[in-house]
Amino acid sequence: FPSGTRCAVTGLSIPSKQLNLPLPATIGDLRNLQTLDLQYNRIPDPLPTSLGNLANLQTLNLRHNQLHDPLPASLASLGNLHALELEANALSGPLPQQIRSMARLQRLFLSSNDLSGPLPQWLGELRNLEHLWLGYNQLSGSLPASLGTLDRLTQLSLANNEFGGQLPGGLTSLHRLQALHLEHNQFTGALPASLGDLSRLAGLYVEQN
């Protein structure tokens, strides 16, 4: 990415090429970029703050890399993002606060990291979410009632975490849900009977609770 580049590139896809250097700050010069797909590489920290300059970005796919550090605060500027795919890295700590500003987000994939702590109530503000994958982390606590406001969800995966308590009744408001993964957690109590009213639900996984 040469310094000072100004061009009409809207997509950059370099998957599975064993890239092993941090992203350069000049990536932020590609102001027309809508898709950045660098999955299945070995890209390390840090992510440049200049990523926040990509105001037109709709898809950011960095799954299966070597990211550990907190995401740069500038990612909160990516208000047009539709897909954030960061699974299979080593991100730790709570769910990144920057995601709260991504109101158009439809796909949030953060599985197979080291995220911990409870899910924030603000997750329910992401009303356009269709796919929410948070499995295989160390997330804990009770599920927030605000999950019930995500009425566009078709897939919700919370498997293999440390969630506990009873399931919120609001889950039965997710009428578009097709797959619900809750297995390998510490949930207690009975399943809400009204889960049976979710007519599109094809897969319900609750074993090992």
Image: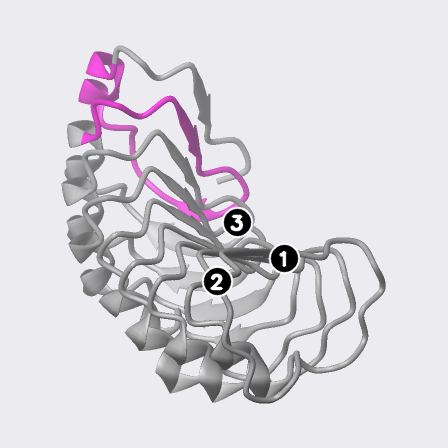
The alpha-carbon separation of the residues under discs 1 and 3 comes to: 14 Å
Q: In this view, does 59 lie to the left or right of 166?
A: right
Locate residue 79: give its quadrant: bottom left
Q: Which of marks 3 and 2 is in front?
A: 2
Which residue occupies 81% across, 75% down? 20
Position of 206 relative to 202 (above/below): below
Which residue occupies 52% across, 31% down? 207
The residue wearing badge 3 is: 135
* Of pointers 1 and 2, the one earlier in the residue sequence: 2
The residue wearing badge 2 is: 8
Q: In this view, does 208 lie to the left or right of 144?
A: right
The residue stretch that appears in magenta: 174-198
Which residue occupies 42% across, 71% down? 31
Q: Can residue 47 be seen at all in this image of the molecule? A: no
The residue wearing badge 1 is: 63
Amino acid type of the residue that numbered disc 1 sits on in the rendered structure: Arg
Q: Residues within 10 Å of mark 2 (few under 14, many from 20)?
A: few
The kind of secondary structure the magenta stretch mainly shows is: loop
Amino acid type of the residue that numbered disc 2 sits on in the rendered structure: Ala
Which residue occupies 66% across, 78% down? 1
The alpha-carbon separation of the residues under discs 1 and 2 comes to: 25 Å
Foreground residue among 134 and 51 = 51
The alpha-carbon separation of the residues under discs 3 and 2 comes to: 37 Å
Amino acid type of the residue that numbered disc 3 sits on in the rendered structure: Gly
**Magenta-drawn stretch contains 180:** yes
| Residue 58 picture location, percent across and down | 39, 54
Q: How crowded is mark 1: few (under 14 residues within 10 Å), some or many (20 or more)?
A: many
Q: Nearer the viewer, mark 1 or mark 2?
A: 2
